[in-house]
Image (cartoon, rainbow, N blue to C red):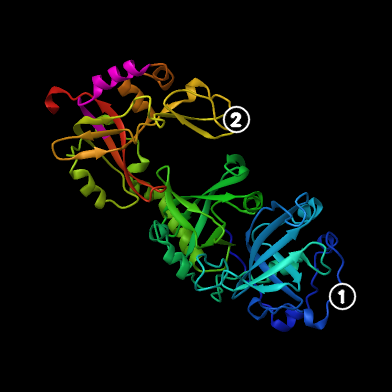
Amino acid sequence: MANIPPVPRLSSATLQTIRPFGNIAQARLSQPLDEPSLSAVVVPIGRLEAVRALVVSRTIRVSDPKPFKDKRNPSQTLWTQSLTIKDEHDTIDIKIWHRSQEHVQMYWWLKLDLLIHVWTDDVKLSTTDSMDSSTVPSTTSPLVMAVNEGKHGHQIVLGSPEENGALFRTALGVNAGGIIDSFHLDQLLGAGDSLHQQQRPDLLVLVQKIGVESQVRTRFGEACKRTLDVLDGQGREARLTFWGALMSRSAEDWTANETVLVLTAPKVGVYNQKLDVSVGYQTHVQVNPLCKTVEWLRHAASQFNTVGQTDRSPAAMNVTLNQITTFYSICDIPETILTLSSLNTSYGYTIGVISQLDIEQRNIDLMSATCLMCRQRVTSHQIMPCETCKAEPPAETWKFTLSRLISFMDDTGELCHPIIDHNVAQAMLGFSASEFSGLNSTERMQVKARLFLERFKVFFKIVWSDFRRQHTVEVVAIEPPVLSDN
């Protein structure tokens, strides 16, 4: 990684001489403004008042425009957009109100780490900055600025190239050129909301791999997504996901193994047996801040690439059944869970009988599928059309969901409702989901009679569930016990 040259610091007097619209091409996209008066100089965020003011700061969070209906005119569609900017000491939220599609397109150039000029006279106190509020302000400053389409003098423009290279490229707070007081991934894993509300912790990461942008279906419709692989200062690897086209586009300017990010108030969990970093509405992202920690981070990353591979957790390894040799009585499983950290995965097996198996026709959770038309999840005791769009998911897409319908018991206790994979359930029942759907009540009772209170060798793993915020027991195989097991 090339050494970052020292950044010149401009005095307040120099800032006041900067023309507010250095990027003339971008300025023409917005409404013309009067010549700035002496009172319209660059103002630090902490000294803003509810008067016309010019703020020059870098973007640390941006969102895509979101449509909504005008309450006064339901036939008209409006758009709202939000971003957060930061100067040397404070942050502030910017709300942009669009009344036309053309105005939305004007602000499609926004992304992370842009130096922008905000020109508005609409500066208000945030309503969320209250001790009694259930939400935490997304800024360190209780101020919010609004930019409204059609209001004379309201606009956002890009800074000039000279400004982009000189202004406000500092580390977090007033810590320019110093070491950022950063947490690491293990410290933030499973951290409660109190830590994020009181400290708003910072996480320093190195971008290791930049994934491609993709479109995915969510319950809110189509969404843009980009996944990155990052390393923290201890060489711990994680997955970082950006949602939204504007956030995703920012990564196009970054370089793998060179770009460093400071994430303020991220959420860290485990997803698919890998550390996952979530960037939400409260998270701020600074790009390549000046700090000595960068060199230390590069060293840690290089060490991880050469010798760190020996420190892999069992969750990242492929474990076959003949490698699972640890026997547990069912009463030992809860005690084992208490000894595991959220990054540990434990494998074992137990011998028990099936003490619960609810596969009758009255159980609507017996099998499920995802509708290919509306993407809704369909659950039933047999194959049936989607209630939303009336389309029937293909027979091969239906899967067993026995987790809440099965339990095992030995002479020490009961293993209630472990997570059981569809393939494991199919092998145990002897039918595919589509085949089982065609069985009548009598035939289903015969299948249950064949399995109920029968002894089985149950192979399982204990793994952290980020969704449930606890360790869960997942059954990976069920086999009849051999003579030596009895």
Q: Which residue is mark 1?
A: 35
Pointer 2 local density, CA inside 10 Å: few below 14, some 14–19, many at least 20: few
Residue 368 appears in the figure: yes
Q: Position of residue 111 (x, y in %)?
A: 67, 57
Q: Which residue is mark 2?
A: 389
Indicate the quadrant where residue 139 lies.
bottom right
Which contiguous range is marked in magenta? 440-459
Q: Tell me the kind of residue under disc 1.
A: Glu
User: Compared to 280, does 398 lie above or below?
Assistant: above
Q: Is residue 446 magenta?
A: yes
Q: Nearer the viewer, residue 242 or 391?
A: 391
**Element type at marker 1?**
loop
Residue mark closest to the camera, 2 vs 1: 2
Indicate the quadrant where residue 345 lies.
top left
Gap between marks 2 and 1, in whole Å? Answer: 57 Å
Looking at the figure, which quarter contains the C terminus?
top left
Q: Tell me the kind of residue under disc 2.
A: Cys
Label drawn at residue 262: none
**Element type at marker 2?**
loop
